[in-house]
Image (tube, rainbow, N blue to C red):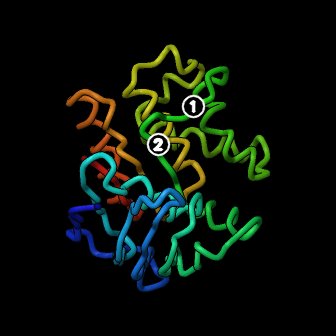
């Protein structure tokens, strides 16, 4: 089970809106093979929070994030993200909610035959943005993660830390108010891990609500 939630509330909430960015109430998740991933989970995340959800491998951390962005459904309980009942949303309504989320994966999930700028801009292209608007947003996103000089590189030309920074840029280029990161430093050395956490700190200081899973 998820064991610990560490909360950084040194930042006062900087965004107007609902009382909670994320509200998880009495959530259980049991798979068809009988494995219980989550049991009676309650979590309330305010705008501007920076949280670490910690626990060993297999404790349900990734399942928790999948529930938050609608990739899985809880067996019971309620999940509100940006005041929307994500556990009930489907199709276009779920897609619209996901535009309010930036999602960062441990294994990066970059497109190998696309450059850094194409990987970052792909999410905006999929949402129907024109080339001019995509170009306008690319620069600030790449600058935030320190990759403005790598825009034309392909993923296999980058280090693991740089690839993770590309995935962060891709997550923030649409300016979502909430970031979900699944063990973003799990495959990185200590130096790269510190750099990635420094980027998250800057994003949180800019007002983004952040939830990170970690060992």
Cα–Cα span, label 1 and label 2: 10 Å
Task: State left or right for residue 47 relative to residue 156.
Answer: left
Q: Is residue 133 left or right of residue 59?
A: right
At horizontal 23% and vertical 71% (from top left) the residue drawn is 9
Q: From what the image shows, is residue 215 above or below residue 92?
A: above
Asked if disc 1 and disc 2 are in contact, CB closer than 8 Å, the reply is no
Q: Which residue is drawn at 61% across and 61% down?
A: 98
Q: Which residue lies furthest to the bottom in this view?
A: 19
Position of residue 103 relative to residue 122, above or below, is below
Query: Pointer 2: residues within 10 angstroms few (<14), some, or many (20+)?
Result: some
Please identify the quadrant where the N terminus is shown. Answer: bottom left
Residue that numbered label 1 is attached to: 110
- Examine the rendered structure and indicate whether residue 127 appears above or below residue 196: below
In the rendered image, residue 38, in percent from the top left (x then y), is placed at 38, 66
Local crowd at mark 1 within 10 Å, few (<14), some, or many (≥20)?
many
Farthest residue in the front direction? Answer: 33
- Residue 61, quarter of the rendered image: bottom left
Q: In this view, does 17 lie to the left or right of 131?
A: left
Secondary element at tag 1? loop
Residue 11 badge:
none
Could you say which is closer to the camera, residue 66 or residue 191?
66
Position in image of residue 43 (x %, y %): 34, 75
Q: Residue 58: percent from the left, percent from the top?
A: 33, 49
- Occupied quadrant, residue 4: bottom left
Residue 5: percent from left, percent from top: 24, 65
Q: How many marks?
A: 2
Q: Residue at x 76, y 65 (%)?
A: 91
Q: Mark 2 points at which residue?
A: 105
């Amino acid at each position: 089970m998820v064991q610990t939630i560490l909360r950084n509330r040194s930042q006062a909430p900087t965004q107007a809106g609902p009382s909670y960015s994320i509200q998880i109430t009495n959530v259980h998740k049991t798979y068809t093979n009988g494995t219980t991933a989550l049991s009676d989970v309650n979590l309330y995340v305010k705008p501007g929070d920076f949280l670490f959800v910690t626990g060993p491998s297999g404790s349900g951390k990734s399942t928790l994030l999948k529930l938050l962005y609608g990739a899985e459904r809880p067996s019971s309980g309620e999940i509100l993200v940006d005041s929307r009942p994500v556990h009930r949303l489907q199709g276009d309504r779920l897609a619209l909610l996901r535009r309010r989320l930036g999602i960062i994966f441990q294994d990066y999930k970059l497109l190998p035959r696309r450059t850094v700028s194409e990987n970052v801009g792909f999410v905006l292209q999929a949402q129907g943005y024109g080339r001019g608007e995509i170009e306008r947003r690319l620069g600030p996103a790449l600058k935030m993660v320190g990759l403005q000089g790598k825009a034309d590189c392909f993923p296999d030309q980058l280090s693991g830390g740089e690839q993770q920074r590309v995935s962060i840029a891709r997550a923030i280029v649409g300016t979502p108010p909430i970031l979900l990161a699944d063990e973003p430093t799990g495959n990185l050395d200590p130096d790269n891990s510190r750099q990635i956490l420094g980027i998250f700190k800057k994003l949180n200081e800019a007002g983004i609500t952040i939830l990170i899973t970690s060992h």
